[in-house]
Image (spheres, rainbow, N blue to C red):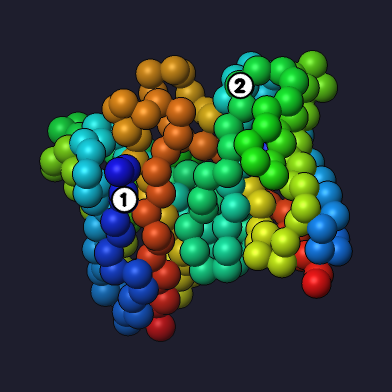
Amino acid sequence: QKEVEQNSGPLSVPEGAIASLNCTYSDRGSQSFFWYRQYSGKSPELIMFIYSNGDKEDGRFTAQLNKASQYVSLLIRDSQPSDSATYLCAVKVGAADSGYALNFGKGTSLLVTP
Amino acid sequence: GAVVSQHPSWVICKSGTSVKIECRSLDFQATTMFWYRQFPKQSLMLMATSNEGSKATYEQGVEKDKFLINHASLTLSTLTVTSAHPEDSSFYICSAKHSQKNYEAFFGQGTRLTVV
């Protein structure tokens, strides 16, 4: 079983702070990594995807990937109460032409306090 | 663009009955759709991969005769939970692969199934 591991939290940060969310994966051959945000009772919303080692920034979000350590993280700068949600790390499974089935972690619950 | 609509959003059914959930890609064609299930405080678990015009591919441990998948057109996949039992109560979510947006799968809004 190829695993995607996340700390379930909750992670509590004050408004305006940086929230750091971490994820490790077991399949060394994984190539594509995704961060989703999921509000209670709703389906996941894509925040970012990352393929290459290093950092990828999009607005207040930065994804970091280290394939050697099999580690991917998400930083949220200037955290807002509306960022409070569960953040899911996902790893694409299957071959390049097999579609985009994803192996999800259990998610980290983030609480941003005013 | 790239909207996936799932219907119904929630359903309550009696034990032993069957429930059909629809997943439609509204503004694009989806040759491949995926069905996930999520129990409370758990991760999304892939149940099956649905391919237009062919049989679905089920993940290990998912009963294909219980969870019937039909992908009869490029914009519609259906999941039928047959002879539902309370342990089938869950959040079912579909996603669709966009042929021209290869970097992500687009999710439906999910269906909350409660079997009583």
Q: Residue at x 58, y 44 (%)?
A: A47
B51 sits to left or right of B107: left
Classify B107 as above or below B52.
below
The picture places residue B75, in percent across and down from the top left corner, at 19, 43
Give percent across and percent down for residue B90: 47, 66
Residue A51 marker: 2
Residue B22 visible (yes or no): yes
Name the amino acid type tagged 1.
Val
Q: Quadrant of the C terminus of chain A?
A: bottom right
For the point 69% across and 41% down, which residue is it? A61
- Give SS at disc 2: loop
The quadrant in which the N terminus of chain A is found is: top right
Amino acid found under the numbered disc labelled 2: Tyr
Percent across and percent down for residue B105 are 42, 38
Q: Secondary structure at mark 1?
A: strand
Circle 2 chain: A
Count the numbered circles shown.
Answer: 2
Q: Is residue B1 above or below residue A94?
A: below
Residue B11 in the image: state x and y as whole percent: 33, 76
Front residue (pair B10, A86): A86
**Which residue corresponds to mark 1?**
B4
Up-down relation of residue B19 to residue A55 (above or below): below
